[in-house]
Image (tube, grey):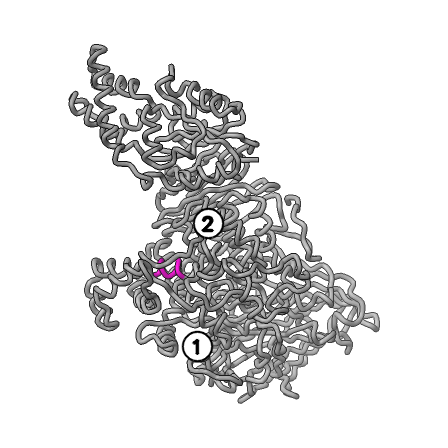
């Protein structure tokens, strides 16, 4: 086992694959009930002990839940208005069917009494069985060993199974009481909006009970939603002398009692199988048969058989989803714990979702949010895509309710999905931070687009996803209105809930832009590939070509607020005009702000609860250059409280991308063990499923740099300090890949499936059955220095005159009947005119007398000057102007080292001549690149030693010239081509001076 490096707040030991409790801690019980919870996507049960809790009532919250089983209550508004949400749906806490009491010669076993001689409780994420082993001495001195096992079956959706083995260490009479307790204690009503309404305990009434020896059944019905629940148990003993059994019902408790006498060391095992079925799964009249069938199937294999099936299901999951950090057991434990809980919480049937707290507690009343699509679905998209599809199918199933909600909000067409819900009804009573978050529509459409790109499964579009995408896109077209040359979207709320009801929220508009473009793409695909289906759908929706064309127009012209003076994107039209929150004057105990300040106080300030603009930079990073991302990140990070558990994982991902690796690691650490360490102080109400998904994303999309672009996988991995290696698996189009990153480089492995081409920092990597493994080095870390000057090449760095050179050289080559191809054109980059002409002549085997050679060289220059005479500032390459201004603003001198004799004229045409302190006169050079002469002259003219200069070049010869001059070299282009450069970026739009300047 590798050494544990990360500091942990939990008293639980670190084990990469297990959660282990080595002593009973009553004051940690409420938290541990969450951590040791079990589930299968249908049933979830908290990790309470088999026997009744006898301690402080507030230190335990007994809980068992069924995904999507709910009741409703009217939302009461003292001041009402049209269109407000009317009904709240809330997940129900069910009668406790886990109860197993043990008595030894009449003394009732309980951890709160007697003496605990030995204790361990563990949950192995590869086994899926909660195991507790206790050696206990009763107050009267009787000693006993009790081993309890519990699972929620991943193979039998309705089954909760238990095995309790009692071994007296002295001869004794043993009594088991296996019970169903119909009394339900719900969560308390709380001022904290993240918790629940406390209504759960009032919602179920008993309509039928059955108690016969070995079998108990309880049938309950909800108060308002009209749903029926059936809980049925079978219990029996193995071992010991013939058991005396009895059944009883008293005070709402259905009990099966077994008595047996055993000798010292003789084990007796109670096996209890529980089926939980509801009328959301089958008609109420069929529930008895459903429960009986489930119990019969479970009992046929027994507890150990179920445990074996559990092991196999989890092995299949980890085969696709395994993730490991070598050298840090604590982080590996956090990652495995998070993935395990996501796997056991996610709805699998296409009718249920994953709640914000999974199936582990009543926080947020069991509602699901946009978290599903943005934080959880990406995990399953790359591990078990069939579960990702099930989540999307769940949204499709509630499309009609979304249409009805859109009418409530005044939209005559289209569909608007609810902010928080269980069955598709809007349950948010606070519309400024709820219903106003229209971006939920775009989040769902984005998830559909990502699913189709990752799987190639276009059938989802025909199975309702296209209709959803079109109907939800209509809302953006309805909201967007033209102002000047752009479209605006007013009075919405973005992900940041510390800012509400704004115009042109950046995230909302970015995602709406993406949504509309995808809707246009889907319409085009259906029109070409499924014309009959598209015609039928268009007729059903009244969708015409001009409407699709309007979507494209809105997408192209949607306003994305940008503050040119600051060089950053504005979170909305008014955000940057507000006063910045007084962070220095805010006491630490006043966080989270939402519990200590009126919303209006918060709304009036620049303060972010969570990632908003920064989230856009991750999801649609392809729209923005790195330099802008860095400025955005720096600005918004400084005013973000991270009061939301959804925040730090996104900041970690973007920090990784913009080169802030230490900050990325700090954010990751806040997320990775959030629940095990209870860093937000509220895990006892349930796990944070979004943050769990965010942990996976922080590693895969952050440290490994995965981005999917039009079906292609692009990686840009880095290795955090202190880690020896990390690895993970993911799936893509039916293939399984493994990525491992260590100091020696990154290794990409095709584990299963067809050949694939992926990309490492822009370079293609081909994997196949014949060559399944490829390794590539990580980029060398750039040694930042206190540079005094930056010297730029011109062509391919600041502007692209290559096309003019290309046209002029091709025209000359054509006159000589010499073929001029791309390979020859590439070889001329960075080479002076006379040498370039010689290379062309050599290729054509043409020899010229000196006068003719000079004439052709001059002629090429005449043609070239004619072409560059048309240049304007618009011909600057992306990021060039911003880079030059940033370098000058930092107090550094700026030089130009171009072999082009036309460089001064080009700078004038581009309108940037005044930004350069020195321009080397190419006419005075004795040697061209790769000779270092030109960069040495530039340094001399700038009054800086070569070692104090950073050279920027796009050509191999230019990089060689820089290195020969003794300067640090920044390459512009592909790392594989510019292998000798100290660092390589794609273009100056990725240039961040702080990455190079100490």
Residue 333: x and y, percent? Answer: 60, 53
Residue 783: x and y, percent? Answer: 55, 32
456 with respect to 648 (left or right)? left
Residue occupying the far top of the picture: 849
Q: How crowded is mark 1: few (under 14 residues within 10 Å), some or many (20 or more)?
A: many
Mark 2 or mark 1: which comes first in sequence? Answer: 1
Residue 614: x and y, percent? Answer: 48, 54
> Vertical placement of 895 versus 736: above or below?
above
Numbered range of the magenta stretch? 509-518
Would you identify the image quadrant in which residue 38 lies? Answer: bottom right
316 with respect to 337 (left or right)? left
The structure residue drawn at horizontal position 35% and vertical position 32%, both measured from the top left corner, is 907
**110 or 939: which is nearer to us?**
939
**What residue would you read off at disc 1?**
425
Residue occupying the far right of the picture: 140
Q: Does the magenta stretch include residue 517?
A: yes
> Vertical placement of 409 versus 801: above or below?
below
* Label number found at residue 565: 2
214 with respect to 556 (left or right)? right
The structure residue drawn at horizontal position 44% and vertical position 34%, both measured from the top left corner, is 984
Q: Is mark 1 on a helix, strand or loop?
A: loop
Indicate the quadrant containing the C terminus: top left, top right, bottom left or bottom right: top right
Residue 868: x and y, percent? Answer: 27, 32
**974 or 48: which is nearer to us?**
974
Mark 2 or 1: the one toward you: 2
Magenta segment, prevailing SS (helix, strand or loop): helix
């Amino acid at each position: 086992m590798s050494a544990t490096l990360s500091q942990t707040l939990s008293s639980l030991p670190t084990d990469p694959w297990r959660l282990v409790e080595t002593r009973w801690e009553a004051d940690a019980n409420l938290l541990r009930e969450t951590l040791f919870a079990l589930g299968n996507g249908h049933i979830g049960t908290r990790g309470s002990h088999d026997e009744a809790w006898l301690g402080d009532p507030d230190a335990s919250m007994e809980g068992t839940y069924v995904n999507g089983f709910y009741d409703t209550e009217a939302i009461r508004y003292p001041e009402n208005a049209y269109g407000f949400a009317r009904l709240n749906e809330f997940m129900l806490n069910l009668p406790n069917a886990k109860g197993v009491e043990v008595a030894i010669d009449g003394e009732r076993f309980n951890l709160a009494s007697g003496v605990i001689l030995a204790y361990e409780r563990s949950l192995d994420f590869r086994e899926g069985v909660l195991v507790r082993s206790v050696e206990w001495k009763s107050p009267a001195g009787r000693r006993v060993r009790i081993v309890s096992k519990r699972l929620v079956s991943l193979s039998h959706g309705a089954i909760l199974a238990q095995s309790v083995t009692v071994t007296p260490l002295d001869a004794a009479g043993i009594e088991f009481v296996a019970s169903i307790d119909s009394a339900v204690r719900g969560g308390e009503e709380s001022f904290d909006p993240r918790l629940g309404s406390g209504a759960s305990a009032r919602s179920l009434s008993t309509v039928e009970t059955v108690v016969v020896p070995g079998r108990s059944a309880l049938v309950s019905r909800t108060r308002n939603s009209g749903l029926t629940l059936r809980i049925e148990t079978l219990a029996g003993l193995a071992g010991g002398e013939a058991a005396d059994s009895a059944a009883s019902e008293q005070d709402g408790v259905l009990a099966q009692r077994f008595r047996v006498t055993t000798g010292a060391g003789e084990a007796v095992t109670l096996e209890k199988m529980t089926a939980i079925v509801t009328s959301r799964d089958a008609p109420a009249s069929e529930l008895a048969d459903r429960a009986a069938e489930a119990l019969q199937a479970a009992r046929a294999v027994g507890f150990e058989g179920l445990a074996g099936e559990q092991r196999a299901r989890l092995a299949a999951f980890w085969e696709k989803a395994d993730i490991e950090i070598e050298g840090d057991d604590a982080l590996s434990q956090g990652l495995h714990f998070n993935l395990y809980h996501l796997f056991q919480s996610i709805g699998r049937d296409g009718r249920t979702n994953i709640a914000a707290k999974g199936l582990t507690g009543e926080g947020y009343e069991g509602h699901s949010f946009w978290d599903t699509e943005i934080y959880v679905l990406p995990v399953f998209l790359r591990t078990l895509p069939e579960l990702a599809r099930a989540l999307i199918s769940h949204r499709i199933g509630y499309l009609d309710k979304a249409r009805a909600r859109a009418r409530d909000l005044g939209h005559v067409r289209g569909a608007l999905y609810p902010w928080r819900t269980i069955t598709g009804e809007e349950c948010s009573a606070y519309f400024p931070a709820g219903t106003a978050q229209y971006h939920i529509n775009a989040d769902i459409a984005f998830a559909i687009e990502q699913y189709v790109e990752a799987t190639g499964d276009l059938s989802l579009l025909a199975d309702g996803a296209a209709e959803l995408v079109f109907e939800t896109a209509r809302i953006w077209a309805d909201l967007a209105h033209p102002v000047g040359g752009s479209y605006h979207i007013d009075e919405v709320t973005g992900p940041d809930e510390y800012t509400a009801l704004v115009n042109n929220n950046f995230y909302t508009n970015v995602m709406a832009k993406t949504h509309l473009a995808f809707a246009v793409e889907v319409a085009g695909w259906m029109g070409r590939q499924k014309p009959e289906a598209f015609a039928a759908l268009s007729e059903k929706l009244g969708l015409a070509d001009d409407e699709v064309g309007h979507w494209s127009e809105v997408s192209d012209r949607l306003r994305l607020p940008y503050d040119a003076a600051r060089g950053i994107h504005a979170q909305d039209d008014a955000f940057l005009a507000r006063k910045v929150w007084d962070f220095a004057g805010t006491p630490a105990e006043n966080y989270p702000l939402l519990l200590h300040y009126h919303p209006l106080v918060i709304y009036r300030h620049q303060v972010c609860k969570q990632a908003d603009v920064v989230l856009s930079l991750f999801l649609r990073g392809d729209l923005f250059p790195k330099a802008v991302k860095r400025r955005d990140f720096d600005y918004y990070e400084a005013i973000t409280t991270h009061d939301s558990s959804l925040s730090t994982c996104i900041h970690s991902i973007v920090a990784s991308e913009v080169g802030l690796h230490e900050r990325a690691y700090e954010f990751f650490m806040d997320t990775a063990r959030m629940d095990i360490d209870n860093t937000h102080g509220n895990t006892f109400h349930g796990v944070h499923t979004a943050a769990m998904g965010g942990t996976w994303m922080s590693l895969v999309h952050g440290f490994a740099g995965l981005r999917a672009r039009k079906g292609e996988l692009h990686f840009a991995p880095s290795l955090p300090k202190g880690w020896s290696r990390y690895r993970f698996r993911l799936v893509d189009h039916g293939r399984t890949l493994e990525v491992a990153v260590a100091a020696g480089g990154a290794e990409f492995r095709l584990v299963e499936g067809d050949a694939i081409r992926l990309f490492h920092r822009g370079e293609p990597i081909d994997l196949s059955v014949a060559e399944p493994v490829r390794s590539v080095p990580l980029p060398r870390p750039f040694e930042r220095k206190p540079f005094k000057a930056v010297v730029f090449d011109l062509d391919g760095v600041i502007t692209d005159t290559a096309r003019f050179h290309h046209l002029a050289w091709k025209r000359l080559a054509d006159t000589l009947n010499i073929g001029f191809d791309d390979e020859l054109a590439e070889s001329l980059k960075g080479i002076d005119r006379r040498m370039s002409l010689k290379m062309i002549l050599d290729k054509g085997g043409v020899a010229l007398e000196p006068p003719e050679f000079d004439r052709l060289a001059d002629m090429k220059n005449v043609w070239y000057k004619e072409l560059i005479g048309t240049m304007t500032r618009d011909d600057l390459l992306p990021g060039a102007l911003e880079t030059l201004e940033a370098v000058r603003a930092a107090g550094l001198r700026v030089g130009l080292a171009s072999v082009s004799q036309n460089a001064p004229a080009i700078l004038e045409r581009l309108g940037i001549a005044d930004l350069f302190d020195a321009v080397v006169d190419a006419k005075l050079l004795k040697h061209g690149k790769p000779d270092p002469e030109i960069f040495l002259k530039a340094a001399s003219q700038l009054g800086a030693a070569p070692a104090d200069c950073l050279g920027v070049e796009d050509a191999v010869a230019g990089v060689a010239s820089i290195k020969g001059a003794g300067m640090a070299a920044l390459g512009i282009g592909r790392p594989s081509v510019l292998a000798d450069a100290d660092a390589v970026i794609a273009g100056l739009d990725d240039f961040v001076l702080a990455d190079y300047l100490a």
